[in-house]
Image: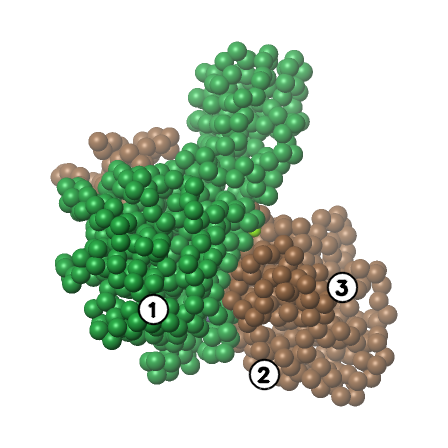
Chain colours: A brown, B green
Amino acid sequence: MSDVFEITEKDLLGRIGKLYTPHGIVETPTVMPVINPNLRLIEPRELKRYGAQMLITNSYIIYRTERLREAALSKGLHEMLDFDGPIMTDSGSFQLSVYGSVEVDNPGIVSFERDIGTDIGVPLDIPTPPDVPYARAREELEITLAREAEAKAYKGDMLLAGPVQGSTHLDLREEAARRTYEIGFDIYPLGAVVPLMETYRYKDMVDVIVRSKMGLGPDAVVHLFGAGHPMMLALAVALGCDLFDSAAYALYAKDGRYLTVDGTYHIGQLTHLPCSCPVCMAHTAKEIAGMDDATRTRLLAEHNLYVTFAEIRLIKQSILDGDLMELVERRCRSHPRMLSGLKQMMNYSAYIEKFDRVTKSSFFYLGPESARRPEVIHYNRLLKNLQVSGKVLITTRRDVDSRGFDRVFHVKAPFGVFPEELSESYPIGQSEVIPELDCEAREAALQNIADFISSHPGTQFTFAYDQPWECQSIERLAAIAGLIRLG
Amino acid sequence: MSDVFEITEKDLLGRIGKLYTPHGIVETPTVMPVINPNLRLIEPRELKRYGAQMLITNSYIIYRTERLREAALSKGLHEMLDFDGPIMTDSGSFQLSVYGSVEVDNPGIVSFERDIGTDIGVPLDIPTPPDVPYARAREELEITLAREAEAKAYKGDMLLAGPVQGSTHLDLREEAARRTYEIGFDIYPLGAVVPLMETYRYKDMVDVIVRSKMGLGPDAVVHLFGAGHPMMLALAVALGCDLFDSAAYALYAKDGRYLTVDGTYHIGQLTHLPCSCPVCMAHTAKEIAGMDDATRTRLLAEHNLYVTFAEIRLIKQSILDGDLMELVERRCRSHPRMLSGLKQMMNYSAYIEKFDRVTKSSFFYLGPESARRPEVIHYNRLLKNLQVSGKVLITTRRDVDSRGFDRVFHVKAPFGVFPEELSESYPIGQSEVIPELDCEAREAALQNIADFISSHPGTQFTFAYDQPWECQSIERLAAIAGLIRLG
Ligand SMILES: [Mg+2]
Ligand SMILES: [Mg+2]
Ligand SMILES: [Zn+2]
Ligand SMILES: [Zn+2]
């Protein structure tokens, strides 16, 4: 068990947790606004107003800027930034990836982070970008792992992050996660995912997150490094990410961009402000677009923070309510590439099911992806243990002659069969489905019915179905059950 | 053409319009907060702060309350309510439907509305509830139509609403709409839809709206009477509704309920406030839940108004951007019954297509319903005019040997075929689709391909397809085209 992280609530791979830091407890999931120590768009102490609990800044920028270095070493990072909550610092890895070299080594930067009193430090890892040759990803990963192990000797009382690299080579990501976890860190950033998000490669992002999770213990605090767009937060939390950081709120603001949970607008493109935050209630789009650069940037940054933390609160509430999956299904309709990400998430349902909470207040069918939810797998896994024998009728309609059968099962898509006595139990009783069957919901139900039949070889099954169920897949059931077409 | 309504932008059946009233121009779509003249939770003049342009109150309550009646007759409605914008008044029809009788007749209430200076008055129509026998719906409809015709003689300079009734008998709704439109009114409320919304019958709501629209001219201002939950606004606007009214903001607030675009929470159920409105930024859920009744109700009403008008602004922006369909597809995933409503909307795509704008900035594939969008129908209708002859290859892959063919067409789901020269044009070039084909997207494309082939009988077609397209429906193409299975 992690000695800095306590999980209080779960839904899918998502969780609400308490992260204990030298400067207080942070409730996760949360986003850390990125502070540029040279250019404070919004004063760090003001950020709490928008919902921020914790900040992240760059120790390397402080290190190589004499004025900042002196101040940080003499007064400490917190006094220098005038912020009394937890602060994480990045190490210069990003600069290393951009410029090819940095003016500090791994022990040097970790010692510096420790000396200025950062709450969570990061070693000088190598953020290997997506799609590089396997050999390079492997080579850089070994350097990263060695530096991470080395960093532990210099960390002092500081919490230490162990970044997980491996590029888009998923076996390397999983291995990196496992080996980093074995070394043992306080938080685990998943590195170099920004290029995936910038190019809308959410399917690959899902792969990288899930394969990393598979290598980490469930108690590992996972930080999706560089990710903070409100559009993808629900999906990433559902996959088990706890921490995010947002430079976007400020960088996008400088560029005139206005964040929403469904994507990004340029302020000049907006006639109406589709938000009720204090900024948007006090101004029109035209007013903001016409302001001087500094004021416009400041207001957009504030709006961007408001929407980001409102989304974090909605995600937390959804975890408490057990309806995070429904939120993810909605959010993944902001863009077709997000939908691809959702479909990829469902390819990991059997894995997610192992960690998901056992009951939820409801199950909403919201599209083909709902048919492959972890809850559907969970239900059918349990159902296989049900004892049945003799002649069993499985029927899609209730008004059917069941004389001559020892037992009757009903059908609910996408789940499959259920006996009357489970009709009020979770998830059958709590699932809201629609009469208009998507093809995937029908196919999932038929597959689950076939699996149920196959797992009870001593029993004689008959399947009675009506018109909405008519399809080619019915024929597959003919080999294992009698079929009755209801008029 | 309506002489009080000017349409400035369109998307689907939705539009942005200007409604000219005696107290100023209202930009539609918009929601009119309902004012209870006996109990002003929020002062009418304050409502503009949340985004309200126009209010609605009940003339019958004013009429039968002596103090209010005297004040309204002597000072006028606007001074009595201290609101200088447009005010619509309902007539007592609701009370009639609840109590069976009212203490005023149709000429009496219309004259009263006129005398107190209402901007838009409503006759004493009969709001026939859903599911009543046909004969009753017919009988009440004839009374409503007679009273509507009668009301015109008493309206003076007031704008007059002609409610469309007919219960859930869709032919009656369409007839009611047509006959009401023939009599001629300034706005057309669709009546008695509240019971449908209260029971989540969004599929039936879609039917009632669309069939009413079919009877009305496109210049008719449509008011979805009694509807104001932010969850269904985008869907209703997309179907052509321009005005809404919300008693919900106040009634729900009294009951401790907190509205969101995805549904309703009870404030006591919330740990986190998933919103960034001024109320939610200034308070925690626990604080609000623990306040005295009046303060809690006031704050919840303010939040409810903030989210309602933020949604109206998003809907307007989406109409301007031509991506209202994408918003509707997201919003219809708040509940499976909303998804049923969306699927029902797509059953009317051929009708919607006739009024939809011709090009849009993008087309996002977001699920099986996207496959049936009006844009897909529109594209294929135009495509049928394309001249082709000789030997034509239709191929799902580009790296295919096309020697021996006079022409090559490519395939994009859900649209169907496209020639190279249309690959950059709308909608082919602007459509973002996913490689993971939902069964409905594939079937729609195959159907569109079959229709295209059938509409060019002199041409010899060959269809070359690869693995994702493998399915039973391919066999149907065998009768009208040569088939090549690509390895
Ligand atoms: Mg919920
Ligand atoms: Mg848009
Ligand atoms: Zn805002
Ligand atoms: Zn709020």
Q: Is residue A446 above or below residue A209?
A: above
The Cα atoms of the two marked residues, 3 and 1, are separated by 68 Å
Secondary structure under tag 3 reads helix
Q: Tell me what residue is drawn at x 45 percent, y 22 percent.
A: B475
Check the residue under mark 1 and report the chain it is in: B
Q: Is residue B63 visible?
A: yes
Q: Tell me what residue is drawn at x 42 percent, y 34 percent.
A: B350
Q: Which mark is residue A94?
A: 3
The Cα atoms of the two marked residues, 2 and 1, are separated by 60 Å
Where is residue B204 drawn, in percent x and y?
30, 46
The Cα atoms of the two marked residues, 2 and 3, are separated by 27 Å
- The foreground one among A458 and B215 is B215
Where is residue B349 drawn, in percent x and y?
42, 37
Q: Which residue is mark 1?
A: B76
Labels 2 and 3 in the same subunit = yes
- The foreground one among A444 and B451 is B451
Check the residue under mark 3 and report the chain it is in: A
Q: Tell me what residue is drawn at x 26 percent, y 73 percent.
A: B70
Labels 2 and 1 in the same subunit = no
